[in-house]
Structure formats: structure tokens, C-alpha cells
Image: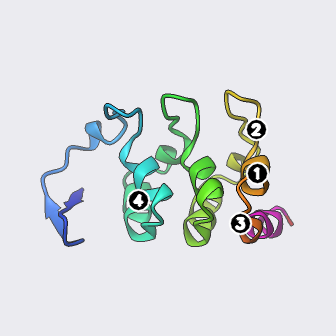
């Protein structure tokens, strides 16, 4: 796998075994990429292992939870396409992606997730 440098250019050298590791803030690379709407990075990580979308942060959230909070529509679609059941994953606070989208005024994200259920 290649890693990204600050300019968004892929560079060789990222060790796949490190992708699942939490950083000091409790996030994996896919959590950070998903929350920031970096769809291409998320796609590259999912090519390495689509199970990365199931990784949980220190507080128990999946990348999909963070995309729902921030309304990252493209990434929401990518993650749900990997595993549709992610949409039902409950946080340690007992919230689903639907709760988080509505709670954070991300109604377009809510609509995208509803459409994916149909």
C-alpha cells in the first residue's frame, strides 16, 4: 500500500499492519480520512482490507459514525457499500448513525443512509 504525503500524492512505505493502530487521540487512519471527507484515501484503505471500515475508535465509533456526524456524503456511500450493516452499528453511548446525523443537523447524510437501506 502507498501512503499519502501532505500534497495528497501517494508514497510507498506505509505498513498495512499499522493501519489498524489507534493514534494518541484514539483514531485510526480510516477514521481521520472518513471524518475529513477524504474519499480517495478511504477507498485506498478499503482496497487493502475492507474490514477497516469496522474498526472502532477509542470511544467505540466506526468511520461511518464520524461521516454521519460531519455529513461526508461520498464517504458514507463508500463505507455502506463495503458493509451495509455498518449503518446499524451502535456507539458506546447507544447511538446509531441515524441518531448522529440528525443530532448534528446532517439531514442530507440521513437521507443518503435511508436510500442505502432501500
Question: Is label 4 in a helix, a strand or a loop?
Answer: helix
- Nearer-N-terminus badge (2/3): 2
Q: Position of residue 115 (x, y in %)?
A: 81, 70
Question: Is label 1 in a helix, a strand or a loop?
Answer: helix
Task: From the image, tell me which residue sits under label 4.
Answer: 47
Distance, label 1 to label 3, CA atoms, is 11 Å
- Nearer-N-terminus badge (4/3): 4
Q: Is residue 13 above or below residue 27?
A: below
Mark on residue 109? 3
Q: Which residues are magenta?
A: 109-117
- Nearer-N-terminus badge (2/1): 2
Which residue is located at x 14 percent, y 63 percent? 11
Q: Are marks 1 and 3 in contact (CB under 8 Å)?
A: no
Tell which of 13 and 59 is nearer to you.
59
Does residue 113 show up?
Answer: yes
Local packing at callout 3 (Cα closer than 10 Å; few below 14, some 14-19, many 20+) is many
Q: Is residue 116 magenta?
A: yes
Task: From the image, tell me which residue sits under label 2.
Answer: 95
Amino acid at each position: 500500500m502507498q501512503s499519502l504525503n501532505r500534497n495528497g500524492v501517494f508514497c510507498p512505505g506505509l505498513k498495512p499492519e499499522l493501519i489498524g493502530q489507534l493514534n494518541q487521540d484514539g483514531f485510526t487512519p480510516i477514521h481521520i480520512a472518513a471524518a475529513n471527507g477524504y474519499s480517495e484515501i478511504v477507498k485506498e484503505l478499503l482496497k487493502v482490507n475492507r474490514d477497516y471500515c469496522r474498526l472502532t475508535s477509542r470511544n467505540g465509533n466506526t468511520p461511518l459514525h464520524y461521516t454521519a456526524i460531519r455529513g461526508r456524503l461520498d464517504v458514507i456511500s463508500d463505507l455502506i457499500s463495503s458493509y451495509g450493516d455498518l449503518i446499524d452499528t451502535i456507539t458506546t453511548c447507544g447511538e446509531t448513525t441515524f441518531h448522529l446525523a440528525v443530532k448534528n443537523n446532517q439531514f442530507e447524510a440521513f437521507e443518503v443512509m435511508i436510500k442505502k437501506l432501500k
